[in-house]
Amino acid sequence: MDLAGATFGLLLLLPLLPLIVTMIKLESPGPVLFAQRRVGKRGRLFRCYKFRSMTVDAESRKQELAHLNEATGAAFKIKDDPRVTRVGRFLRRSSLDEFPQLWNILRGEMSVVGPRPQIPTEVADYSPHQALRLLVKPGLTCLWQVSGRSQLDFDEWMELDQEYVRNRSLAYEIGILLRTLPAVIERKGAY
């Protein structure tokens, strides 16, 4: 299912690639892709790819913006993050910034459905109960994404991931996939 889904997604989105690359390059200097170490199944680290939606110095500015963090728990989110570019806002709200993660799926590091991958410093703050989400591959879409995304607090996010791990089945994953497109179109909680 993962290989078929990722291949279909790549073929579907491939025509948008030149437009996305051009928009990113015209707005700000730097690479088109952003690669970051993320934690995968059973704590394995991998390089997760996204289209760059922030300024090139975004990671180095994170500490100076820590006081603006609106997320609870082991997460970092700022609704109107000053590091996000105009093109980046569009890419994030449309979820097109995640398109390169189809490559992560083809490489076997991610799945189409599963908990969203987090960075090692966030995972280090997990409680043993929250670490349950590391028993499965991280995913491109998940229960959290179709249930409100950033409108949910960290504990709600972790509960949804744990619910997914406990109830995981092909039918459950198909249900999440069917809810993904409406959630992406609605853009609720996407920033």
Image (tube, grey):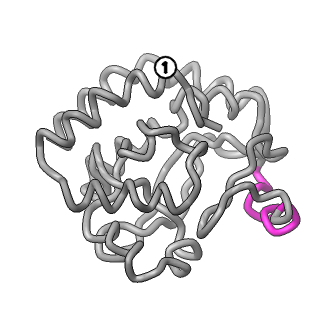
Residue 52, above or below 119: above
Q: Position of residue 57 (x, y in %)?
A: 80, 56
Q: Quadrant of residue 86?
A: top right
Magenta stretch, main secondary structure class: loop
Q: Is 45 on the left-hand or right-hand side of 174?
A: right
Q: Position of residue 178 (x, y in %)?
A: 27, 27
Residue 114 on the magenta segment: no
Kind of residue sitting beneath label 1: Ile
Q: Residue at point 45% right, 41% down?
A: 145
Q: Is 31 on the left-hand or right-hand side of 154?
A: right
Q: Nearer the viewer, residue 22 or 161?
A: 161
Q: Quadrant of residue 143?
A: top left
Query: Disc 1 designates what residue?
Result: 185
Residue 38, above or below 168: below
Q: Residue at point 56% right, 30% down?
A: 188
Q: Position of residue 72 (x, y in %)?
A: 65, 63
SS class, disc 1: helix
The segment highlighted magenta reads 56-65
